[in-house]
């Protein structure tokens, strides 16, 4: 058996480190100018003709918060970009909470989803641990809104 598949071998650690680096490098182009997350093609190119969804933005914020723990270059800035989208263009400033997303034409996807709100909490908690500015406030707001929704 190839030693890279044997847990706790040097070859396995190198194999996993390479996969981790490739995955983190792949997503570098996720943030739109406003911080919400583009879908990405197989080569990491942003698909600007699709919706930018709250749950995906939250997931990318979470991923790059973890990337910052691992020392992946640029991860903290990428997590902060996602946080910008969650605190800005994806947030419903009138009624609270988060829209499901934005269309390619920057129109609001008008419904709200418990699923997306749960991801906001995940992103905020990861970003708090990564020391991203504004994450604590987002965590407090998202938790309170999630409870208010009855999710």
Image (tube, grey):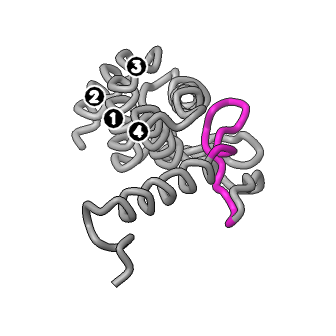
Mark 3 is surrounded, within 10 Å at the Cα level, by few (under 14), some (14 to 19) or many (20 or more) other residues, namely some
Question: Which one is in front, 8 or 69?
Answer: 8
User: In the rendered image, which residue does mark 4 sit on?
Assistant: 66
Mark 2 is surrounded, within 10 Å at the Cα level, by few (under 14), some (14 to 19) or many (20 or more) other residues, namely some
- Magenta-drawn stretch contains 1: no
Q: How far apart are marks 2 and 3 (CA)?
A: 18 Å
Mark 1 is surrounded, within 10 Å at the Cα level, by few (under 14), some (14 to 19) or many (20 or more) other residues, namely many
User: In the rendered image, which residue does mark 3 sit on?
Assistant: 131
Viewer-nearest of labels 4 and 1?
A: 4
- For marks 4 and 2, the one nearer the N-term is 4
Is residue 141 visible to the viewer in this orientation of the structure?
yes
Q: Is mark 3 on a helix, strand or loop?
A: loop
Residue 95 appears at what percent x and percent y? Answer: 45, 25
Q: What element carries label 2?
A: helix
* Predominant SS along the magenta part: loop
Q: What element carries label 1?
A: helix
Q: Which mark is residue 143?
A: 2
- Tell me if 127 is positioned left or right of 100 in this view: left
- Tell me if 14 is positioned left or right of 44 in this view: left
- For marks 4 and 3, the one nearer the N-term is 4
Q: Distance between the residues labelled 4 and 2?
A: 21 Å
Question: Which one is in front, 31 or 95?
Answer: 31
């Amino acid at each position: 058996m190839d030693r890279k598949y044997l847990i706790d071998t040097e070859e396995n650690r190198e194999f996993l480190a390479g996969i981790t680096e490739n995955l983190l490098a792949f997503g570098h182009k996720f943030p739109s100018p406003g911080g919400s997350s583009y879908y990405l093609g197989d080569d990491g190119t942003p698909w600007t003709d699709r919706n930018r969804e709250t749950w995906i933005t939250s997931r990318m914020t979470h991923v790059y918060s973890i990337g910052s723990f691992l020392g992946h270059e640029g991860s903290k800035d990428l997590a902060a970009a996602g946080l910008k989208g969650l605190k800005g263009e994806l947030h419903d400033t009138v009624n609270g909470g988060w829209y499901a997303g934005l269309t390619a034409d920057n129109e609001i996807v008008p419904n709200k989803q418990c699923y997306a709100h749960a991801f906001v909490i995940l992103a905020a908690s990861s970003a708090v641990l990564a020391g991203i500015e504004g994450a604590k406030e987002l965590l407090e707001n998202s938790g309170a809104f999630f409870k208010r929704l009855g999710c």
